[in-house]
Amino acid sequence: MNFNKLTRLFPSFITGTLNSYTQIFFSDSRIFSIILLAVTFFDFWAGFSGLMAVVVTNFIAYLIGFNTFKIKKGYYGFNSLLVGLGLGVFYQPGAEYFIVLASASALTLFLTLWLEGVIGKYALPYMSMSFLLGTWLVSLASRQFTSLEISERGIYMTNEMFELGGKQMVDTYNLMSDLDIWDSVRIYFKSLGAIFFQYHLFAGILIAVGLIIHSRIAFMLSLVGFFSAYIFYQFIGANMHELSYSYIGFNFILTSIAIGGFFIIPSRWSFLWVILLTPLISILLTSTQAFFSIFQLSVYSLPFNLIVLIFLYSLKFRERFFDKPELVVYQQYSPEKNLYSHVNYKARFGKALYFPFILPFWGEWKVTQSHNGKLTHQGDWRHAWDFEIMDEDGLTYSRDGNNREDYHAFNKPVIAPAGGIVEEVVDDVEENEIGNVELEYNWGNTIILRHADQLYSKLSHLKKGSIKVKAGDVVKKGQILANCGNTGRSPVPHIHFQIQATPYIGSRTLDYPISHYIRHKEGVFELKSYETPENSIVVSNVSKNSSLEKAFHFIPGQKFALNVTQDQDKSYTLDWEVQIDALNNTYLYCEKTKSLAYFKNDGDIHYFTHFDGDRSSLLFRFYLSAYKVMMGFYRNLHVNDQYPVNTFNNFLVALVQDCLAPFVLFSSSEYNLRYLGMDDVVMQTNIRLQSTITAKFGRRIMKSMTTDFLIGPHGLEKFIINENEQTTQVNLESSQ
């Protein structure tokens, strides 16, 4: 291994070592990891053994060539850490001991990989099962290892504390140990310490402090889990020694954190399930203790592992109530982040799971009959639309309206609402005179398109002889299919449009939204996403503006040179680049701050989706300011969105909100983008936009920021941020 490879490995190696400690609490918090590392060294040889076990495990994993991301996250190290801590507590250090420790670490790593393959194929976590197997195997084998000496440490804790930190450490230890607190609270703290084989109050209190720093929800869950068990034991008259002997009650704490906020989105349902699972953990705890006592082995975290795995596996068989509780899809190693991101994603993109349909026409058309219509669109066919063109006088025709050609909609192009395959075509129904209808072939000339399994669209009342496709043709979104006519049950020219699950003319309709469209009302424009156009409104598809599209269509490899001026006296330069990760996620990357702003673009709208890095950086402010931008220009259009709840909260607001988040969200962060003007209408450029960011605590505004954008013919040229009476002007140059 050369020096360059070593320097690239070393930062990840340190991170992987620290994360091995916090993974036990389903965390990757650096501060929490340092606290836990320090706690393990209250028994120096136990702490040293745990650290050595992690180092040996991660080193072997790296040399063999296992996944570096998993090493960095501590996935391979945390089970070995627990094995090392356990051995370090039970045995005296020596040459023979360290050979056994290294061997046990390697064994635990391979058990982890085996369990990852066996349990992982069911999309389940392997938890701390390899710690259990490794510890049990070594414990049984060590009975024949006569050179290993049993440790007598822990008997004279005062002496050990003095060696660790002198008189000050002894005084602190005694102060903590002599605290006048309820027995239940004392057992709770000692149970926390017992997770790391530290059976005293001082360790538990420090772990609780670290848990609060990492996650207020996780801390609350630890209380709910433990005290639910404590109350249950008292209620049924169970043996309380199960909670105090070896402080095995940590099974309730870890189960609560895992089920309440890590694998499941924190909510009233997750908290309820934590309480409901308490008796099951108790049954497993008592029964397994009786069995394992035959072999003189401890059950350690076996009940926690079994209950979590069984519960998560059981949820896979649900056929309904998928949100009671909801599983975490994208893991962020924090109950708060899991919750806030989940709520924000559902609000922003929850409906984006629908297949995207556009309106089947160009220009502005009026919805003359929507869902649950007064004339038709009833019963099984109630989810459909009729569209006509209306002029400035509110009329759908010119002259006297007695001829088909008088109607603005007649003979206008009808386009494909989405890509697909032509399933069926009818093109031989004659045109009706105005006021007459054809009842035998009431749908008139029709095209049915297949877009996905059990997803079809139908366009009806088309002009005879105008259909340009045949069954089996592949069509693209926006492709001209036919012209608007007046065939079938159609007294005046119009387009009938519906979504259905089967490929037949006359199929029942589906209640399905339009992906993006513009709502026009009295000169006011409003962007609608994944909604159903209502009756009597004028709608249109998003008409793209080339300058806006160029400004916010970021392409991997594209680079930006930024000249930044703050309050006209401080200037500096920055470089941003559009990059793409292994999972095909695109992001803007700032070299100076190492920050990433993830985004996606569906062709009509640019979205920023996630930020990772320095929240004092300019990239973070750009991420906030250009959070959602539509690619079309409509003067005075408002685009609204919302940020994750914790985007702006200060410490006190965040503290209160985190504690109440599973039950109520009272803080909010809102985004609004206004389309102010376009100076060059002919070239459709020199566009001015203004975004406003507002953070609220209830109804009180806690923070606000505005950003003005100038988009020229070459894309985004300048943006100006006004925040806290400070102005930051940024000029951009783009290159590819």
Image (cartoon, helix red, strand yellow):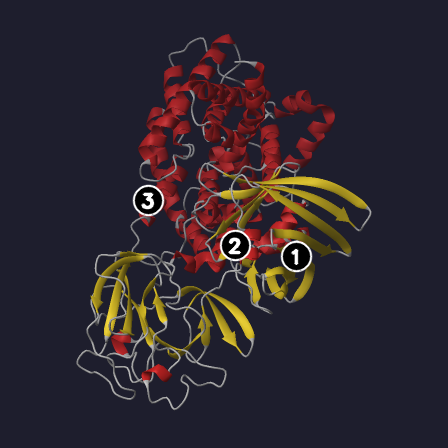
Horizontal side of 202 relative to 429 (left or right) equals: right
Q: Is residue 381 visible?
A: yes
Residue at which label 3 appears: 313
- Comparing marks 1 and 3, which lies closer to the viewer? 1
| Residue drawn at 49 percent across, 50 percent down | 600
Q: Nearer the viewer, residue 69 or 591?
A: 591
Secondary-structure class at tag 3? helix
Q: Position of residue 279 (x, y in %)?
A: 38, 48
Whether residue 655 can be seen here = no
Is residue 714 or residue 727 the one in the foreground? 714
Residue 276 image offset from top left, x and y in percent: 40, 52
Residue identifier under label 1: 710
Name which residue lies at 73% across and 56% down. Answer: 722
For disc 2, the marked residue is 606
Figure quadrant of the C terminus? top right
Disc 2 residue crowd, few under 14, some 14–19, many 20+, Cα 10 Å: many
Residue depicted at 45% across the width and 43% down the height: 258
Q: Between disc 1 and disc 2, whose residue precedes?
A: 2
* Residue type at numbered disc 1: Leu
Between the residue at mark 1 and the residue at mark 2, the CA separation in whole angstroms equals 16 Å
Q: Secondary structure at mark 1?
A: strand
Residue 118 lies left or right of residue 440; in this view the side is: right
* In the foreground, 75 or 229: 75
Q: Answer above or below: position of 141 versus 82.
A: above
